[in-house]
Amino acid sequence: MHWTLDQLKQELRSRKDVKGWIVTQEDLHRRERYFLLDQAKLATDQDREVHAQSVEVRLFVNIGKPGRQGEISKKIVHEKPIGPQLDSAIAAAKETDHEAWDLPTEFPKDVPDVKAADPKMVEDLNGAMESVTREIADAVATPRKTTFNSSELFMSVHERELHLSNGLVNRSKQTRMYVEAAYSFAKDGRSDEYLHTAWTVSPKDVSVTKLFAEASERAAISLDTKKPNTGKFPVLLDADVLAKLFNSTTFLLSSKSEYLDLPHKKPGDDFIPGASGDLITLTLDPSLEFGAVTTGIGDQGIVQKPLTLVEKNKVVTTAIDAQHGQYLKKKAGTYRGNVVLGGGQMDHNQLVQAAPKVLEILQFSGLFIQETSGTFSSEIRLARLHDHTNGTVSIIKGGSLSGSISENFKNAKFSKNRVKRSEFDYGVATGYYGPEFALLNDVSVVG
Amino acid sequence: MPTMNSEKTNRSQKRAGLSSDLETLRPKLLDVLGTLEANPEWYASVFFERKANQTFMANLKQTQLSDSVSAGAVLRIYDGYTLFEQATDQTDPASLLKEAKDLVARVKKSTPSGEKRIYKAPTWAERLATKTGKLDPELLEQIPAGASAKTPVHFGIAFREDPTAIPTDVRIGKLKETLERVKRLAPKASLTEKDLSYIAARQAIAVEESIFVDRESNLSQTLYRVSLTLILMSGAERAAARFGGLGGAEAAEVKDEKIVEMLEDLRCLKEAERLKPGKYTLLLGPTLSGVLAHEAFGHSQEADTCARGRSKAWELHKEGSKVGNDLATILNSPAVYKNATEEAAAWGSYFFDEEGWLAQEQVILDKGVLKPPMTNLTSALRLGIPRSSNGKRESWQNGVYTRQTNTYFSAGDKTFDELLGMIDYGFVAMNAAGGMEDPKGMGIQVGVQYLKEVKDGKYTGKVFKGPAGGDIQITGYVPDVLNSIVAKSKIEADKSGADTVKHPFNDCGGCGKYHKEIVYAGCGGPHMLLKDQILG
């Protein structure tokens, strides 16, 4: 290493053209194992360890225009001296042109102490890896009528330091675990599989035993299937889907969308126009224990606390960061957090019984959501059709479903039981704590 | 951007050289091999990667810039059972040696399980005596005659205008001009400037350098990845496209007619009706036929998925079953150094993969019959099939999987107008909206932004979105879909003569695997006419 963070900060302070900066350093330690069967025994195809550090500077420069400034986000590397790296960054930033804004001058007090890292993983990542590996080995060894195909286990510790030009220094840790199980089932020359995946911040929030058992159970029912009928049906969605859908709605509830003239909601708007089912209360909660987006402070130096954005279907405020708050002349506050939804009145059984026919989605193939319009669609990978007109439950595979949050959640009913979901797919963190199920009406399905 | 060396090609273009600091690093990577080969039965290699990305963005309110670099080395030992990797961004000799020793200790501590499969690195003579067809001349011409284990062999992407040499102010000025062009061209698509609530133009330039060394090879490559992404919005409707390829700055030039096409897409989305779900005749554009190829027998022809017992394709290949009609031929190739009629290489191209295997075209589905799948090192060994150049990772921090590069259907013999004329009633689909594979269940999902209605071989002027106002999904059972191909266009579908180029157009795309890791991928092919497609 050729320089330290203190030297970087000193160098930044010495540049007269730099009006502010945010330095983020992240140290990553990750372990990965890829399992499969070899000679009918659990074997490790790959075993990996990663150590990495990254330092990013977001710096703001004066560009000589009133009310405007320049900006760049730049990764600074340790192999090279700081000076020339900052010189080129500052020169490039001067070519950009933003409305000016400043980091908060008020130093944050009482930064909440949040739980974002599993202590055992932080203390001994390799030990935690061995522990979950044993759980996987036990789950694979459990006799089942299905065949175990493969599993992956990723565990990582992310140590972050945030340094702002206003003097703020914040250090935090986050842990992540990804585990998956794939089982297949063969009968009469046909076969199909079920891949079950889970992300979590703490291993204690995910049961490996349950994940493997459920993957096997769902693989076992994946052969005796039929396609759905074409039409509009009541559809039961689970928390995995709800987490994706409602995290996508935060796009409409952000000050950034408002500033850029992108589609957005304003305080006083109906979240779901004309809603008459269970009315949605949505909170951005950065304090959720072991949530994927659990943090005490945002990258712009603002304390992050739970903030209700939607109360009984009325938008009460939006997520406002320092930059866009100053542009829109609104007070900045919470802009990062896990999406927390209020629960409903019914349990799973009541929701399933709530209509003559209910299509319960067990897994979508690829759920694609347009966050600007709130529309979503996917092939149906596996579902149960509860047909109370003839008392049957049949398994559905294939066809597709198309929905719209604003249309299909109008009369939605939510389960009273709430669950946590975390996701870091493609490196993007989203957290959810809310109903385990929701029943939607009139969802378009084609078979 | 790093200091680059470059040399002239015989096409009077230049080639991207390896940065001088990496030339210095290269011998140090070789030094670690000895430590990694602590056991004579082990196969060791070192992969180093540096990706330097600059992204310039302009929208109606601001201009932005980000400049990032990620570099690290991956030390590998394959002990005959498991592939062990130690990845680090500390690449000074002392750190590399320490990481190598730690890795050796980890391998020695492990308990082997399964069948032992020893691997020996191929020599240059073995590499060049490939049994699966010739290497592309673009690649061959860069290999020195008589190359041996110690010969540093460098591959550089060809380019005309050096994309690393353009000053920031010029780039940003050009982006601002692009926004003005969009506004100026809006009336050509019957839109006004006021209809455009958001316009953004983003130019990205990445210098991707890698070095691979093992006992028999000492390879390096430098790729320039350039693109221009345009996002146009009108209220909640959005049209987006990425133009680019591997090569010089010329790869990201966008013609007015492309912008007008996007503006027309946006207008169509504003005016679209909702589709009644059902079965329809469908004419796919090149990007969508590529997504179909990628999701149908792209993913299921990835050998690591086969080795995990998670792909039906492996069973069907061994049985020799027919899974599509004679028009169903799918290829995968990282060696598309000229993308259809464009000057640049296709988005998913390179010269060697991240396990040091040279790029080569591979037929993965031949007239409806499955050929051996694409592989990475361990999956080739597990299945006992030839290696291919598909060992890819998201970055040096991620593990290798078998990944697709450019996946495309082979070209047909019709013009676009001839295909259109074959439709009594149906739709034309040009704009992709994602896709998903189902390797074991053989389902498929291909997303489409909107459909243009066709009656009696002519556009009616009507446009349709999905039943809920969003994307439309094409779904079905893969063999059914591949048996429903009626006809395919030539590569140059707007001309009546024979094709003058070798590869169909591959669009710029990304591919996620197992829901968490994304790599660059090209998707393409000809226009394809399919009957009885389930749309909803």
Image (cartoon, helix red, strand yellow):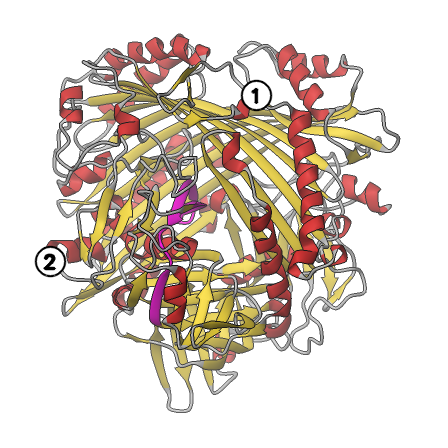
The alpha-carbon separation of the residues under discs 1 and 2 comes to: 54 Å
Q: Position of residue B190 (x, y in %)?
A: 68, 62
Residue, x 38% and y 78% (percent of image)? A228
How crowded pointer 2 is (Cα within 10 Å; few <14, some 14-19, many 20+) is rated as: few
The residue to which callout 2 is attached is B319
- Disc 2: host chain: B
Q: What segment carries the magenta color?
A: B507-531
Q: Position of residue B226 (x, y in %)?
A: 51, 33
Q: Quadrant of residue A160?
A: top right
In the picture as drawn, the residue positioned furthest to the right comes out as A66
Q: Is residue A389 above or below residue B61?
A: below
Report the amino acid beneath label 2.
Glu
The answer to whether residue A445 is magenta is no
Q: Quadrant of residue A33?
A: top left
Can marks 1 and 2 be said to lie on one chain? yes
Q: Could you tell me if the residues under marks 1 and 2 are in contact, i.e. CB atoms within 8 Å?
A: no
Residue, x 56% and y 49% (percent of image)? B258
The residue to which callout 1 is attached is B165
Q: Nearer the viewer, residue A249 or A198?
A: A249
Q: Quadrant of the C terminus of chain A?
A: bottom left
In the rendered structure, find residue A26 and report the number of the disc placed on it: none
Q: Position of residue B363 (x, y in %)?
A: 22, 47
Q: Main secondary structure of the magenta part?
A: strand
B450 left or right, relative to A345: left
Residue, x 61% and y 13% (percent of image)? A4
